[in-house]
Each structure stands twice: as C-alpha cells, then as structure tokens.
Image (cartoon, grey):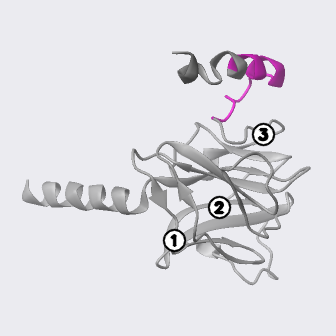
C-alpha cells in the first residue's frame, strides 16, 4: 500500500510539474502551425521547454498556457494573442514533433516515413503513423495514449478550440461550434 501511495504522489508531482501539455493539432496548409493544449487545472509556463522537429529545436520560453487552454505556435500571428512566433517548418509528407523539458520527452507525434537526412530524430519513438493530409488532430481532443492512433488526418483545422469529432462534416461542426462559442459570456 505504501508503494502505491508513493507512486500516486510521484504521478501527481509529474502532472503538476509538466502540466498535462500535449501536442493537440498540427496544420500544414495554407499556414503551418502547431497547437499545444494544457489539460491541467493550472497555468503552465513553458520556460525550459523545446519543440523539436526534423529541422531544429525551438525554445518555448515566454510561452504560458492557461489552464485547460490552447496556444498556437507559428511563424506569424494568425489568430489572437494566444499565438507565439517560432520559425517552424513542417511537411505533410513526413515529420515529427517532440516536446522536451529537461531532456525528458513530454509528448511526441510522427507522421509519414522516417528520413535518414533529418538531423534530429527519435527512431525509437517511430511507429506506423498516419500520413498527414492538411491537418493532424488528436482524437479524442487532448487525450494522450502515446500511440499513433491518437491522431487522425483531417481537412478541418480547429485552431484554439476542441478538435472536431471524426466523421462529422465541416459545415455541421461549424454550426455546433457557433452554438457554444462564447457561451460562458452569455451566462
């Protein structure tokens, strides 16, 4: 019993320390951006975190994700004050994203085929991942099982909001989102 309590305590500390940060969505066209999600009930500063791609490492200092919220990482401001600029390039034909903190992998996703010329790679993480269409979305939204099946290739990006359930057409999903957008402000 003592061992279980100690394990649960360590799990709680790890959850608070790393805040439930996950890669939630990746968009390739027309703009390239990466959406991160904080599933914890606490704001999380990403000072000391890095986003790693086949082409480079990008520090995420000065990025804070509010509790149960999203941020977008992109070359230029695209959506709101929740955008943070990093010079990230990604290809939908193959690639990966790894989030690191203190050399520990916080989250990762890969798609397509592993290429030998990538200077940053984690072959031991590679699995038979889906090819990307226009967008890769975590399904279900914000849930991480460390499996390629966490992500689905889609054509409907949902920046700074929950991912559309797979199988729902874009028009219906837009109508549903419109019904609930800013519902908290109407109460």
Residue occupying the point 83% across, 67% down: 89
SS of the residue under disc 1: loop
Residue 146 in view here: no
- Relative image position of residue 107 (x, y in whole percent): 55, 61
For marks 2 and 1, give the CA distance.
29 Å
Viewer-proximal residue among 23 and 4: 23
Residue annotated with mark 1: 47
In the figure, residue 33 lies in which quadrant? Answer: bottom right
Instruction: Measuring from the top left, give residue 72's x and y in whole percent.
Output: 69, 53
Q: Report the residue marked by disc 2.
A: 127
Q: Nearer the viewer, mark 2 or mark 3?
A: 3
Dot 3: few (<14), some (14–19), or many (≥20) neighbours within 10 Å?
A: many
Residue at the spot 66% in from the left edge and 50% down from the top edge: 82
Q: Nearer the viewer, residue 2 or 18?
A: 18
Mark 1 Cα shell of 10 Å, populated few (<14), some (14-19), many (≥20):
few
For the image, the number of numbered tags is 3
Q: Position of residue 181 (x, y in %)?
A: 65, 23
CA distance separating discs 2 and 3: 24 Å
Question: First in sequence: mark 2 or mark 1?
Answer: 1
Determine whether 179 is above or below 42 in the image: above
Task: List the single residue furthest toward the right.
Answer: 30
Q: Which residues are magenta?
A: 162-176
- How crowded pointer 2 is (Cα within 10 Å; few <14, some 14-19, many 20+) is rated as some
Horizontal side of 142 relative to 82 (left or right) equals: left
Q: Quickly name the residue at label 3.
A: 157
Residue 151 image position (x, y, % from top left): 66, 46
């Amino acid at each position: 019993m003592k061992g279980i309590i100690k394990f649960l305590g360590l799990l709680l500390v790890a959850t608070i320390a790393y805040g439930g940060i996950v890669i939630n969505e990746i968009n390739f066209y027309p703009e390239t951006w990466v959406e991160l999600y904080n599933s914890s009930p606490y704001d999380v500063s990403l000072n000391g975190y890095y986003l790693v791609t086949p082409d480079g490492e990008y520090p995420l200092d000065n990025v804070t994700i509010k509790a149960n919220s999203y941020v977008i990482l992109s070359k230029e401001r695209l959506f709101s004050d929740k955008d943070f600029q990093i010079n990230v390039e990604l290809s939908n034909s193959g690639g990966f994203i790894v989030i690191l903190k203190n050399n520990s992998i916080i989250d990762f996703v890969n798609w397509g085929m592993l290429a030998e010329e990538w200077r940053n790679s984690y072959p031991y993480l590679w699995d038979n991942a889906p090819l990307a269409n226009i967008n890769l979305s975590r399904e279900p939204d914000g849930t991480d099982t460390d499996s390629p099946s966490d992500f689905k290739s889609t054509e409907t990006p949902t920046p700074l909001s929950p991912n559309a359930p797979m199988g729902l057409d874009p028009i219906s999903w837009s109508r549903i989102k419109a019904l609930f957008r800013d519902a908290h402000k109407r109460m």
